[in-house]
């Protein structure tokens, strides 16, 4: 898949220099950055859901309690 992107000369230079600094191609750097951003949004959604569930039922367990419940040593 090919994606084109319009950038100002200033933005283009900045992105190229940053990719060079990280020893990556521009394509690798942009791909990695976009995928990390998507992962961050998924993580934030999961966090918000977990916090909402906790607010509705604020029960917590210690590590020792969990080990007992799971019959771990």
Image: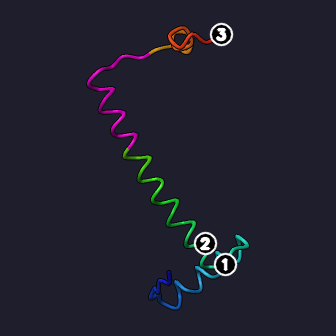
Residue 47 covered by magenta stretch: yes
Q: CA distance from mark 1 to mark 3?
A: 49 Å
What residue sits 42% from the left and 50% below the top? 42
Q: Is residue 23 left or right of residue 2?
A: right
Label pair 2/1, CB-CB below 8 angstroms: yes
Residue 45 location, x and y as percent?
36, 46
Q: Is residue 18 left or right of residue 23?
A: left
- Please, which residue is most extreme toward the bottom here? 9
Q: Is residue 19 left or right of residue 41?
A: right
Mark 3, residue position: 73
Segment colored magenta: 46-60
Which image quadrant is residue 13 in?
bottom right
Check the image and tell me how it is coloured.
Answer: rainbow
User: Is 58 placed above or below 33 here?
Assistant: above
Residue 14 location, x and y as percent?
58, 81
Which image quadrant is residue 28 in?
bottom right
Q: On residue 29, which mark appears?
A: 2
Q: Which callout, 2 or 3, points at the residue further toward the start of the chain? A: 2
Q: Secondary structure at mark 1?
A: loop
What residue sits 52% from the left and 83% below the top? 11
Labels 2, 3: front one: 3
Residue 34 covered by magenta stretch: no
The secondary structure making up most of the magenta span is helix
Residue 25 location, x and y as percent?
66, 78
Mark 1, residue position: 25
User: Is 57 placed above or below 52 here?
Assistant: above
What residue sits 48% from the left and 54% below the top? 39
Q: CA distance from mark 2 to mark 1?
A: 6 Å
Q: CA distance from mark 2 to mark 3?
A: 45 Å
Residue 12 location, x and y as percent?
55, 86
């Amino acid at each position: 898949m090919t994606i084109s992107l319009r950038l100002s000369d200033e933005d283009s230079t900045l992105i190229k220099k940053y990719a060079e600094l990280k020893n990556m191609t521009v394509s690798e750097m942009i791909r990695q950055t976009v995928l990390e951003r998507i992962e961050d949004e998924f993580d934030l959604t999961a966090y918000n859901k977990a916090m909402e569930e906790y607010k509705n039922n604020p029960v917590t367990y210690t590590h020792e309690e969990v080990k007992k419940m799971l019959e771990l040593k």
